[in-house]
């Protein structure tokens, strides 16, 4: 290497050394949190399905529109319960704990009953069964804002008598594939008697033949999860209303 070349490379090296010396802080640099922008028009979250990673730092930017809302993640309320006034933008930095994983319901407190729900997934999505219902106020269909199932099956609406679902009466049902489904409409082929409470019940397709057999005397696909009555004593919503049903015991043939 000639003298000029040596000096040239020294000249190139010195600023690099200075740059590193100046840039090195007392602690490791913290990367900026990932920004997630969510608009709240009407009674909706846009987008309504949010996925983050365990240990990730996020910056929620919540853009309020016409109505005041809350942005709550069920089961993670200690971490994410944010009020957003109308026309207000709220920014909140959150570190997702490393040990958290699963799919959680995102909802607005005042408007959950209007179906203002979504999902907040940490890590890999979970398909733990979940039926989200709100008050049935009459009419030819019942809408479930959120249905999650891990197996193919049916959501069936049954009336309730003395606190129990009348499984012999099937007011309406809809076939459902594994996954996360929003605003599932269940047409009611039989309108409920005035003011009687209803149950939404998840049945697995078992045997997996794509058929739901509910004729009297024949076993239907097994009911797996049910909600509490949706019109009994007013409003019942959310995961806390979901009840795991006992495994049905086959009735011995006479
Ligand atoms: Cu709201």
Image (cartoon, grey):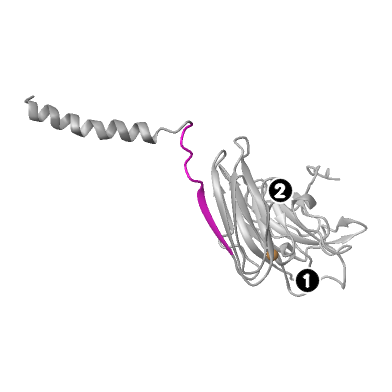
Q: Residue at x 81, y 62 (%)?
A: 230
* Quadrant that contains the C terminus: top right
Image quadrant of residue 135? bottom right
Residue 71 position within the rendered picture, expressed as x and y whole percent measured from the top left: 66, 57
* Quadrant that contains the N terminus: top left
Image vertical order of residue 18 relative to residue 234, above or below = above
Residue 57 position within the rendered picture, expressed as x and y whole percent measured from the top left: 54, 43
Of 108 and 1, which appears nearest the observer? 1
Q: Is residue 144 left or right of residue 138?
A: left
Q: Residue at x 72, y 65 (%)?
A: 111
Q: Can you tell me which quadrant of the image ligand 1 is in?
A: bottom right
Q: Can you tell which of label 1 and label 2 is closer to the viewer?
A: 2
Q: Which residue carries the number 1 mark? A: 190
Q: Which residue carries the number 2 mark? A: 77
Of 3 and 83, which appears nearest the observer? 3
Magenta run includes residue 29: yes
Image quadrant of residue 110? bottom right
Answer yes or no: disc 2 within 8 Å of ligand 1.
Answer: no
Does dot 2 land on a helix, a strand or a loop? loop
Do labels 1 and 2 touch, CB within 8 Å? no
Q: Is residue 162 left or right of residue 22?
A: right
Residue 45's mark? Answer: none
Magenta extent: 27-39
Furthest residue in direction right, as rendered: 162
Image vertical order of residue 9 relative to residue 245, above or below = above
Of 223 and 59, which appears nearest the observer? 59
Residue 177 visible in the current orientation: no
- Alpha carbon of mark 1 to alpha carbon of mark 2: how far? 39 Å
């Amino acid at each position: 290497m000639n003298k000029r070349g040596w000096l040239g490379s020294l000249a190139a090296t010195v600023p690099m050394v200075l740059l590193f010396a100046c840039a090195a802080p007392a602690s490791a640099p913290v990367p900026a949190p990932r920004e997630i922008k969510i608009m709240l028009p009407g009674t909706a979250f846009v987008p309504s399905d949010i996925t983050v990673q365990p240990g990730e730092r996020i910056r929620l930017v919540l853009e309020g529109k016409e109505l005041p809302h809350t942005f709550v993640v069920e089961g993670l309320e200690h971490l994410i319960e944010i009020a957003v006034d109308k026309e207000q933008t709220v920014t909140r930095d959150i570190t997702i704990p490393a040990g958290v994983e699963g799919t959680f319901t995102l909802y607005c407190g005042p408007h959950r009953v209007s179906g203002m729900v979504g999902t907040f997934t940490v890590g890999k999505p979970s398909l733990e069964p979940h039926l989200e219902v709100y008050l049935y106020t009459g009419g030819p269909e019942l809408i479930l804002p959120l249905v999650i199932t891990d197996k193919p099956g049916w959501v069936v609406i049954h009336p309730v008598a003395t606190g129990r679902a009348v499984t012999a009466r099937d007011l309406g049902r809809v076939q459902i594939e594994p996954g996360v489904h929003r605003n599932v409409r269940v047409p009611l082929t039989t309108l409920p008697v005035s003011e009687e409470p209803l149950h939404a019940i998840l049945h697995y397709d078992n045997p997996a033949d794509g058929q739901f057999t509910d004729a009297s005397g024949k076993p239907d696909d097994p009911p797996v999860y049910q909600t509490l009555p949706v019109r009994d004593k007013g409003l019942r919503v959310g995961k806390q209303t979901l009840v795991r049903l006992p495994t049905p015991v086959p009735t011995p043939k006479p």
